[in-house]
Image (spheres, helix red, strand yellow):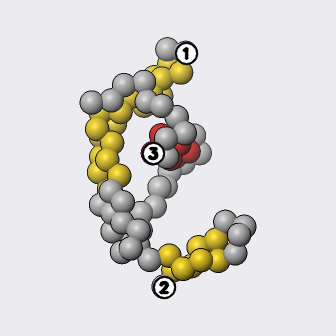
Amino acid sequence: MLWVGWGLGLMPFDAQKTAVRLLFDGVTYAVDGKGLVSDLSFELPGQGIHVVMGANGAGKRLLLELAHGLLTPSQEH
């Protein structure tokens, strides 16, 4: 069992019960005409644990903000 917490105490996390598929299909994101993401497509299955890794400035936060709907893509299929 994996336990997760965000300042509200620890809660059990069961990936099998909280399965949500993540799908990006041709996502593009630009700010002031500068393209930051261009035609990004991938799919993550709902089961399992996934990790986003990369160097500083690689776009990890941008990817997660797009995935959570905190940013609106400039274009998507």
Q: Position of residue 5 (x, y in %)?
A: 64, 71
Secondary structure of the residue carrying numbered label 2: loop
Disc 3 from disc 1: Cα separation:
21 Å
Q: Mark 1 points at which residue?
A: 32
Between 39 and 69, which is closer to the camera in this rendering?
Answer: 69
Q: Do the residues under discs 1 and 2 have CB atoms within 8 angstroms?
A: no
Q: What residue type is labelled 2?
A: Met
Secondary structure of the residue carrying numbered label 3: helix
Relative to 20, 32 lies left or right: right
Mark 1 or 2 closer to N-term? 2
Q: What residue type is labelled 3?
A: Ala
- The image shows residue 72, relative to residue 34, as above or below, that is below
Residue at image location 27% in from the left, 30% down from the top: 77
Q: Which amino acid does label 1 sit on?
A: Asp
Disc 1 from disc 2: Cα separation:
45 Å
Relative to 24, 14 lies left or right: right
Q: Residue 67 carries which label?
A: 3
Q: Where is residue 69 in the image (x, y as percent from the top left)?
A: 49, 41
Residue at image location 34% in from the left, 36% down from the top: 40
- The image shows residue 20, relative to residue 17, as above or below, that is above
Q: Name the residue under label 2.
A: 1
Eye-nearest disc, 1 or 2: 2
- The image shows residue 59, relative to residue 44, as above or below, that is above
Eye-nearest disc, 3 or 1: 3
